[in-house]
Image: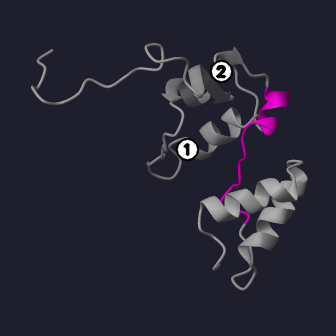
Amino acid sequence: MRRCSGVPRPVLPHEDGPALLRTEGLTKQYGRQTALDRVSFFAAPGEVLGLIGPNGSGKTTLLETVAGLLPADAGRIVWKGQILPAGCRRKVMFYLPDGIRPYQDQPVARVLSFFAAVYQRSSEHIANIISALSLTPI
């Protein structure tokens, strides 16, 4: 592999501590239909990831499996270097499916408060998120 001069080499999680989140060989099947086929990726602290693909490509299945809402047929989820069982994932991650949309005139704070209660987050935690993401005006 040729290196480009002046372009820094990416730092992989194992080189600078563990990844924040890692999936390893995640597989999910519905009968004979494979929705996820050994999906592996990692997210480093502070990194923002996005999933792009056509309808039916497995984006929602992946997110729901990572969040612990769907059981995986194989693979594992690792959080900060430790295997994270499905029942413990709600303590470290938040998943809001796009099918659950608030009313257009509903303030963000009300929607966040509802999901904060579901995920057992404090009012202070929600206030910090609203502030950090500059959501106060909306």
Residue type at numbered disc 1: Lys
**Main secondary structure of the magenta stretch:** loop
SS at circle 1: helix
Q: Which coloring applies here?
A: one colour
Quadrant containing the C terminus in the rendered view: bottom right
| Above or below for 92 versus 27 | below
Q: CA distance from mark 1 to mark 2?
A: 19 Å
Q: Which mark is residue 7?
A: none
Nearer the observer, 74 or 79: 79
Residue 132 located left or right of residue 10: right
Is 79 located above or below residue 46 in the figure? above
In the shown orientation, is residue 95 left or right of residue 9?
right
Is 41 in front, or is 36?
Answer: 41
Q: Is residue 33 magenta?
A: no
Quadrant housing the N terminus: top left
**Residue 98 pos. (x, y %):** 65, 60
Q: Report crowding for label 1: few under 14, some 14 to 19, many 20 or more residues within 10 A (C-alpha).
A: some
The residue identified by callout 2 is: 78
For disc 1, the marked residue is 59
Identify the magenta region: 86-100
Rendering coords of residue 5 (x, y %):
9, 26
Residue that appears at 76% across and 34% down? 68
Left or right, 122 with respect to 33, comes to right
- Where does the image place residue 33, in percent across and percent down from the top left? 60, 31
- The verdict on residue 99 being magenta is yes
Which residue type carries mark 2?
Val
The residue mark sitting in front, 1 or 2, is: 2
Q: Is residue 86 above or below residue 123?
A: above
Quarter residue 89 falls in: top right
